[in-house]
């Protein structure tokens, strides 16, 4: 009887240890994600909906895991709110991601299938805080393909301004506190090639609308 | 007697490990994975008054259409909003700053239909009301 109890205990200990080890991996992964790209935990459980739905979301989350060795910083930009950092990375599922790290260290990741610029000449994202009526922070960030030499940001008041590209062709266009107070937000962009021809554009829906 | 004591200690350690493990992260969808989204359609998860704190929010789509993810706090304000056309759009709250009441929210901000779903990750002890 004692031997049986010991066997049960040892098996229980092994299962528990493995579980804890798995969760520790998650915790480390979470810590990593705070700096350089969101990496979903490797072990997931619970949730709502049926099992098939949950499995599908688990698959999607697994697919979007960033491969750490592919992370590359393409720019650090000073804004009124602090430094915004941009990175690109690839995922285990073959996606390419643009990662932006806000001054608050909040992190946004946008991943698309295939290589960068598979869906257009400009890979972009808008990040904000506050809202939906008045925002306290907002920036349009992105990176343009080699064929783009100039990008112009359109504001909701009809004004426009060229965004400065760095050596990696990345940019961050941050709204000023005055613009945010007046509810003047980035409303789109136009990208031009060296010859001045329009090669990509986007009208961006108002965030809080 | 000594063996029995050892076994009991091992069992306690194992159960303790499971208890620690259950405080880690878990995925929680708040829509189905392949739902159709009409222009302007939006969805949200539950507030994390109870259960693990939401710390990430993802809108996964099959098409490159504009979408939005954010968190809505107890006052209805938005935090950590993101909008773009990427198929997998995620916003993540900095580690340690997720300890406020909120719910995840996603919206099809494009003028086109799109297909996809929204989910987030939560962490902390389930059922722990604060």
Image (tube, coloured by chain):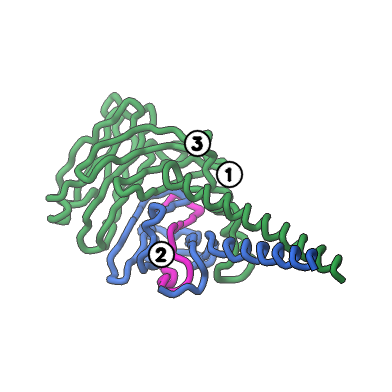
Chain colours: A green, B blue
Residue furthest out toward the front: B1
> Number of marks in the image?
3
Is residue A4 in view from this perspective?
yes
Tell me where residue A193 appears, x and y as whole percent. 31, 28
Left or right: A207 with respect to A98?
left
Give the spatial CA distance, label 2 vs label 3. 29 Å
Residue linked to disc 3: A115
Disc 3 crowd, CA 10 A, few/some/many (<14, 14-19, 20+): few
Quadrant into which the C terminus of chain A falls: bottom left
Q: In the image, is residue B122 above or below residue A114?
A: below
Q: Quadrant of residue A6?
A: bottom right
Left or right: B92 with respect to B26?
left
Is residue B111 in view from this perspective?
no
Quadrant into which the N terminus of chain A falls: bottom right
Residue linked to disc 1: A93
Q: Are tags 3 and 1 found on a single chain?
A: yes
Circles 3 and 1, Cβ within 8 Å, touching? The answer is: no
Q: Which element is circle 3 on?
A: loop
Chain letter for mark 2: B
Q: Nearer the viewer, residue A97 or A10?
A: A10
Q: In the image, is residue A178 above or below residue B48?
A: above
Give the spatial CA distance, label 3 vs label 1. 12 Å
Q: In the image, is residue A48 above or below residue A31?
A: below
Q: Which mark is residue B104?
A: 2
Tell me where residue A22 appears, x and y as whole percent. 62, 53
Q: Is residue B52 magenta?
A: yes
Disc 1 crowd, CA 10 A, few/some/many (<14, 14-19, 20+): some
Q: Nearer the viewer, residue A68 or A183?
A: A68
């Amino acid at each position: 009887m004692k031997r049986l109890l010991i066997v049960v205990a040892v098996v229980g200990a092994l299962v528990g240890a493995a579980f804890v080890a798995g969760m520790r991996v998650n915790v480390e992964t979470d810590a990593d994600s705070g700096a350089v790209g969101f990496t979903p935990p490797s072990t997931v459980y619970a949730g709502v909906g049926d099992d098939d739905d949950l499995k599908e979301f688990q698959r999607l989350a697994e697919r979007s895991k960033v491969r750490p060795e592919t992370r590359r910083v393409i720019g650090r930009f000073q804004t009124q709110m602090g430094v915004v950092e941009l990175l690109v990375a690839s995922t285990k599922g073959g996606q390419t991601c643009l990662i932006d790290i806000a001054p608050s260290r909040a992190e946004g990741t946008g991943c698309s299938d295939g290589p960068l610029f598979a869906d257009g000449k400009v890979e972009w994202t808008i990040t904000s805080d506050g809202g939906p009526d008045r925002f306290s922070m907002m920036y349009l960030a992105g990176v343009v393909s080699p064929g783009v030499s100039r990008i112009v940001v359109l504001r909701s008041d009809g004004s426009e301004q060229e965004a400065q590209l760095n050596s990696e062709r990345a940019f961050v266009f941050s709204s000023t506190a005055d613009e945010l107070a007046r509810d003047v937000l980035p409303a789109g962009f136009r990208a031009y090639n060296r010859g001045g021809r329009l090669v990509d554009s986007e009208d961006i829906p108002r965030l809080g609308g | 007697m000594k063996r029995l004591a050892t076994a009991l200690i091992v069992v306690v350690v194992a159960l303790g490990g499971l208890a620690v493990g259950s405080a880690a992260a878990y995925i929680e969808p708040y829509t189905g994975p392949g739902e159709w989204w009409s222009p302007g359609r939006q969805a949200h998860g539950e507030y994390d008054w109870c259960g693990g704190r939401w710390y990430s929010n993802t809108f996964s789509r099959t098409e490159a259409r504009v979408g939005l993810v954010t968190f809505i706090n107890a006052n209805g304000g938005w935090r950590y909003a993101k909008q773009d056309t990427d198929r997998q759009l995620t916003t993540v709250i900095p580690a340690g700053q997720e300890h406020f009441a909120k719910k995840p929210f996603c919206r099809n901000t494009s003028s086109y239909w799109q297909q996809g779903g929204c989910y987030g990750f939560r962490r902390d002890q389930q059922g722990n009301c604060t």
